[in-house]
């Protein structure tokens, strides 16, 4: 069995710590955890100091200048399926 290596994503700049945070994907859930109190990490512009669940569309910022939007591909699939289900219900309701 092959051991998986952690994926490292290195940011540099003001207020970025060498080991800033951990982003984990476990069982379909994605979280961000700052490594220290000095690791400025924000979710939707609110500073977080403990493990925080990320949801589709949330903004995650590291330090003062590195901001990213979290995109969950599973959410897109659910949205497409819900839209298709809604349209199908309309077609079935109004079919002559």
Image: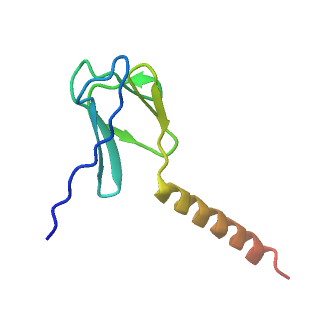
Pinpoint residue 60: horizontal percent, then vertical percent: 43, 33
Quarter of the rendering containing residue 46: top left
Judge whether 1 appears above or below 40 on screen.
Answer: below
The front one of 2 and 51 is 2
The structure's colour scheme is: rainbow
Judge whether 67 appears above or below 7 on screen.
Answer: above
Judge whether 91 appears above or below 51 on screen.
Answer: below
Judge whether 52 appears above or below 78 on screen.
Answer: above
Pinpoint residue 25: horizontal percent, then vertical percent: 31, 51
Q: Is residue 94 left or right of residue 27?
A: right
Q: Residue furthest bottom?
A: 96
Point 47% across, 30% down: residue: 67
The front one of 65 and 74 is 65
Q: How many marks?
A: 0
Quarter of the image with the N terminus is: bottom left
Quarter of the rendering containing residue 26: bottom left
Q: Residue furthest right?
A: 96
Quarter of the rendering containing residue 47: top left
The front one of 17 and 40 is 17
Point 55% across, 57% down: residue: 76
Q: Is residue 96 left or right of residue 67?
A: right
Quarter of the image with the C terminus is: bottom right
Pinpoint residue 90: horizontal percent, then vertical percent: 75, 69
Point 70% across, 73% down: residue: 88
Pinpoint residue 94: horizontal percent, then vertical percent: 81, 74
Point 28% across, 43% down: residue: 8
């Amino acid at each position: 069995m092959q051991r998986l290596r952690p994926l490292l994503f290195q940011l540099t700049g003001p207020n970025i710590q060498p080991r800033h945070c951990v982003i984990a994907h476990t069982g379909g859930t994605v979280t961000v955890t700052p490594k220290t109190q000095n690791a400025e990490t924000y979710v939707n512009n609110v500073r977080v100091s403990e493990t925080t669940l990320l949801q589709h569309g949330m903004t995650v910022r590291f330090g003062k200048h590195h901001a990213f939007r979290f995109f969950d591909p599973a959410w897109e699939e659910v949205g497409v399926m819900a839209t298709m289900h809604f349209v199908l219900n309309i077609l079935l309701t109004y079919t002559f």
